[in-house]
Amino acid sequence: MIRKKPKPLLPGNTVMVRPLYEILSTLDQAGTLDRLPFMPEMAKYCGSSYTVYKRIERTCEEATGDMRRIQNVVFLDNLRCDGSEHGGCQKGCRIFWKEAWLIRPEYNMISPDEHAQGNKTVVSLPCKLPNGLYICQSTELVNATTPLSLMNLMLFVRDIRSRTYSILRLIRVLFHAFFLRLRYYLTGKSFRFLRGRQIHTPVESLGLQSGEWVRVKTKKEIEETLDRKGMNRGLGFTVDMIPDCGKTYRVLRRLEKMIDEPTRELIDLKDTVILENSVCHGCYILKGGCPRENFNFWREIWLQRAEQNLQAENRRRAHPDPLA
């Protein structure tokens, strides 16, 4: 009897992450499958069920700054790396899940006892090199992916088949990216960054904490904090962030350290936060944007505390807690 090949996982499908011992059997000596690492932070999800959020047929990677082909990978719910085994990296990247690491519940023939036994396996999964540099899924994307030609129209067909984009959404994304490039060739205006004129960019510390509400400053106000490359102390304000100007967001957390993908180094940051639901869509990328949805990084000088924060602070000052 010929066994049918399982259908590709699509958004909305329910899956279970295989027990750790099963996943280990799919990995090579470097702890990777198709050169994509299974990170130690992923082990805690083994044996649990999740919903496929998105199927990924391509992704950006920062080592070359290009969009590249990746296969047999999905994102689950809102599972992001907590960086606990990678020096406390706070970028919060989405986790790439190979389909071989997942199973549909209807095919699950493993007993709960086997799950519990398998997840007790102690292993050493890749996270740090002998020279002190880190390896994670993000740093290894250039190795786990292949070049993607803009002339290969199948990349857009795959986007539609995998439901990454609807036809209308894909047309809008491509049109916007084309517009940004055309504007660059006609006017010289950057298709990737909002540029300013500062030589030495200013600093402002707000001490923002998780849960606080902030308003993003206007485009003009932010331009006054940037140099001619669109940077504030080396951190760029991208065109993806311009639509957020004037909007109100809640602070997800401070960003004080992260792994730099091209160098694999754990670097420190100051006066920077991540905002809830503010993610990069790669709107300038001619290959159809980027479905990876990395968080945008916000210098505090680009933000101001929202009115509700100020009102709450004024109420606390006017009516102090006698027990505090």
Image (spheres, rainbow, N blue to C red):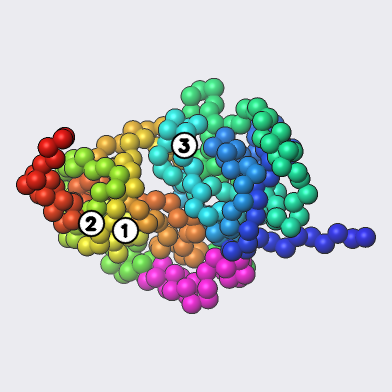
* Residue nearest the observer in this picture, 176 or 245: 245
The verdict on residue 169 being magenta is: yes
Distance of label 3 from label 2 (alpha carbons): 27 Å
Distance of label 2 from label 1 (alpha carbons): 10 Å
Answer with the quarter of the image where residue 142 lies.
top right
- Quadrant of the drawing holding the C terminus: top left
User: Is residue 102 in sight in this rendering?
Assistant: yes
Distance of label 1 from label 3 (alpha carbons): 24 Å
Mark 2 surroundings within 10 Å by alpha-carbon count, few (fewer than 14), some (14 through 19), many (20 or more): many
The amino acid sitting under disc 2 is Val
Q: What residue lies at 21% left-to-right and 56% top-to-bottom?
A: 215
Q: Position of residue 309 (x, y in %)?
A: 18, 51
Q: What residue lies at 61% left-to-right and 66% top-to-bottom?
A: 162
Q: Across the whole image, how many numbered discs are drawn on residues? A: 3
User: Mark 3 sits on what residue?
Assistant: 83
The answer to whether the residues at label 3 and label 2 have Cβ atoms under 8 Å apart is no
Mark 3 surroundings within 10 Å by alpha-carbon count, few (fewer than 14), some (14 through 19), many (20 or more): many
Mark 1 surroundings within 10 Å by alpha-carbon count, few (fewer than 14), some (14 through 19), many (20 or more): many
User: Mark 1 sits on what residue?
Assistant: 241
The answer to whether the residues at label 2 and label 1 have Cβ atoms under 8 Å apart is yes
In this picture, which residue range is highlighted in magenta?
Answer: 156-179
The amino acid sitting under disc 3 is Gly
User: Mark 2 sits on what residue?
Assistant: 216
Q: Position of 67 compared to 322: left or right? A: right
**Which of the two marks, 1 or 3, is nearer to us in this view?**
3
